[in-house]
Amino acid sequence: MSAGAIIGMVLGGTGMYFIERASDWKEIGTITLHISGIEQLILPGMAVVLALSVIAEEWICHCLKKNCNALLKADGEECDRLEYEEEKYGAWLTGVNVLSQVLCILILAFGYSLDYIGRGGSTSITFLWACILFLSCFFYDGIMQVRYVKLVQKVHPEKKGDPSSSKFQKEWLASCDEAEKEIVFQSAYKAYMCMNKVIPLLLLLTLILNLFFNTGILAIIVVAGMYLVMTVAYSKACVQIRKEKKSSVKIFDKCCEKNINKFIL
């Protein structure tokens, strides 16, 4: 009870602080931000993100190439260790890749408004260069993903799929062995369970922000839609997989019955 009282006091005090300070905050659209002059940081911020992304991803790719070359000549326990290192470098590369894209979106969002773009002059030119850097970052990240896939396929020729194809994920999974598929399935389930906890918290956060700062219902609708799509997709997949397994069992039983009848005859 005492812990609940303390939490209630903290939340209540925080809420009152935000309400009292809300009138002093600068409005950008319908969201209030305690930030001034953030638009001037869009171009340098985008340039920094692009530069750091290139440096980090090229370094990880270099380490991955070195590891893959050693993996081609290794065997036994050394091979297992290098495969683990390959997986680790791949996870780092994917993480940095996604992080750079998210940061670019967040930075560009501060200037992505008709009011900011409509000021004309140097403002429009700055935003145009920021957009060019934004597209360059996404293009580089896409190329890096293709390079990563090609590098893995060089070491593991059994891995199939063209990274530029819309069927790549399906073809790649089909070329994995049972142990690799088990890792993929367990990882996907853990990711689903994580999002199943995070999305309700995000939904609650958007409700609170709309209550105190009148941010609008769009964010609430987007988060609620993501929650609904994720839940429906998971439930649909469970039913479909169960149906396919049931059909496979029936076919197997029929084949066994035919073979038994032939043996008896």
Image (spheres, rainbow, N blue to C red):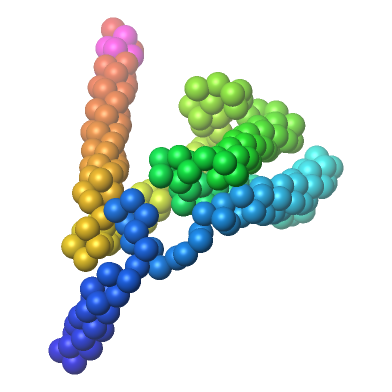
Residue 208 seen by the camera: no
**Quadrant of res 248:** top left
Q: Is residue 258 rendered magenta in the image?
A: yes
Does 218 sit left or right of 44 as displayed? left
Is 128 on the left or on the right of 63, as rendered? left
- For this rendering, which residue is in front, 48 or 92? 48
* Image position, residue 152 (x, y; %): 69, 36
- Residue 218 vertical position relative to residue 31 in the rendered view, above or below: above
Residue lying at 41% horizontally and 40% vertically, measured from the top left: 114
Residue 24 image offset from top left, x and y in percent = 32, 71
- Residue at 26% in and 23% down: 247
Residue drawn 46% across and 52% down? 110
Q: Residue furthest bottom?
A: 2
Per the picture, the main secondary structure of the magenta-coloured stretch is helix
The C terminus sits in image quarter: top left
Depicted 156 relative to depicted 93: above or below: above
Horizontal relation, residue 50 to residue 165: left or right: right
Residue 28 in the image, given as x and y percentages of width and height:
37, 55
Quadrant occupied by the N terminus: bottom left
Q: Residue 153: horizontal and vertical position, in percent?
A: 69, 31
Q: Quadrant of residue 9?
A: bottom left
Q: Farthest residue toward the left?
A: 1
> Does 205 appear in magenta?
no
Residue located 57% across and 55% down the image: 40
The number of numbered badges drawn on the structure is 0
Q: Can the viewer see residue 115?
A: yes
**Residue range corresponding to the magenta coloring:** 257-262
- Between 21 and 119, the residue placed more toward the observer is 119
Residue 217 appears left or right of 73: left
